[in-house]
């Protein structure tokens, strides 16, 4: 078991989920309650990573994050390191790649909240922020938790985008999925079996814990 690769994947997933939680809430709530021109286009762009092959998406990341791009050149001039084949580049790519897994469940949860509940909260003197924090967020919590779990699991297991954007640099971009692939390529079946089994058990325990937390939260709302 390559613990360094596992902990790097864990760190990448936690950072990505933290960013996606904020972005997901902002995007999902805006799409759920606001009507504006181009809304369908924005929803399509957010969903695009679900249908694009990971290698194609990874290629676009290489083009737009490389040192020849405006963003890549700016990043390297300020931080004196390339954005691609770095942990920072992996985080940026993971956030974009996992964005639909976070937004979609949150969006459906916010859309299921009747507008009359929000209006009643405003009539009771709650501000828009208080309504979101005390009314909307608790009611949409199941979707929020689902989005976080899906994006975390997706980031932990992503392979194509990681390989294209980050390569296979030990301690920096070598994630658990890349390490497992290497073991299979070198016919190290014992190491591959242990890594695959560990990730299976880890994912199962994580889902069980999340379901328990979600059930307790829903019971608390009743």
Image (cartoon, grey):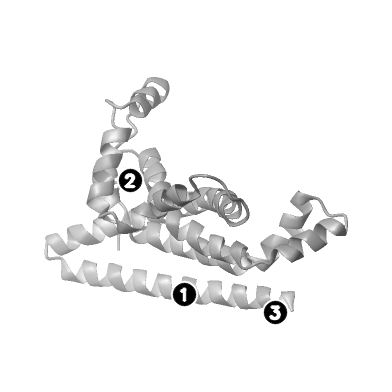
Residue 120 in which image quadrant: bottom right
Residue 36 to residue 148: above or below: above
Q: Residues within 10 Å of mark 3 (few under 14, many from 20)?
A: few
CA gap, disc 2 to disc 1?
26 Å
Left or right: residue 62 compared with residue 128: left
Residue 99 to residue 167: above or below: below
| Label 1 close to label 3 by CB (< 8 Å) | no
Left or right: residue 130 compared with residue 5: right
Measured as percent of width and height from the top left, residue 54 is found at 27, 53
Q: Which residue, as the protein is rendered here, is positioned at the far right?
A: 124
> Which of disc 1 and disc 2 is earlier in sequence?
2
Residue 159 in which image quadrant: bottom left
Residue carrying label 3: 219
Which of the two marks, 2 or 1, is nearer to us in this view?
Answer: 1
Secondary structure beneath dot 3 equals helix
Measured as percent of width and height from the top left, residue 137 is found at 67, 61
167 vs 188, nearest the viewer? 167
Measured as percent of width and height from the top left, residue 210 is found at 54, 71
Left or right: residue 124 compared with residue 16: right
- Identify which residue is drawn at 75% across, 65% down: 117
> Which of disc 3 and disc 2 is earlier in sequence?
2
Residue 205 badge: 1
Which of the two marks, 2 or 3, is nearer to us in this view?
Answer: 3
Q: Quadrant of the C terminus?
A: bottom right
Residue carrying label 2: 171
Q: Residues within 10 Å of mark 1 (few under 14, many from 20)?
A: few
Left or right: residue 199 compared with residue 190: right
Residue 91 to residue 217: above or below: above
Q: Is residue 168 visible?
A: no
- Identify which residue is drawn at 28% across, 31% down: 66
> Which of disc 3 and disc 1 is earlier in sequence?
1
């Amino acid at each position: 078991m390559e613990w360094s690769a596992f902990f790097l994947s864990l760190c990448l997933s936690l950072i990505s989920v933290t960013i996606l939680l904020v972005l997901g809430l902002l995007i999902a709530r805006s799409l759920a309650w606001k009507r504006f021109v181009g809304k369908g286009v924005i929803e399509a762009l957010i969903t695009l990573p679900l249908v694009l092959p990971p290698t194609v998406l990874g290629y676009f990341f290489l083009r737009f994050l490389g040192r020849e791009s405006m963003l890549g050149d700016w990043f390297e001039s300020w931080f004196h390191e390339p954005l691609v084949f770095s942990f920072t580049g992996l985080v940026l790519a993971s956030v974009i790649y996992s964005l639909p897994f976070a937004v979609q469940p949150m969006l459906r949860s916010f859309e299921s909240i009747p507008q009359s509940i929000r209006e009643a909260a405003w009539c009771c003197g709650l501000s828009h922020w208080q309504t979101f924090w005390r009314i909307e967020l608790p009611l949409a919590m199941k979707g929020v938790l689902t989005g976080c779990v899906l994006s975390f699991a997706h980031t932990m297991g992503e392979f194509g985008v990681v390989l294209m954007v980050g390569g296979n640099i030990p301690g920096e971009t070598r994630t658990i999925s890349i390490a497992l692939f290497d073991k299979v390529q070198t016919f190290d079946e014992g190491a591959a079996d242990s890594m695959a089994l560990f990730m299976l058990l880890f994912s199962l325990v994580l889902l069980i814990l999340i379901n328990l937390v979600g059930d307790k939260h829903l019971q608390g709302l009743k």
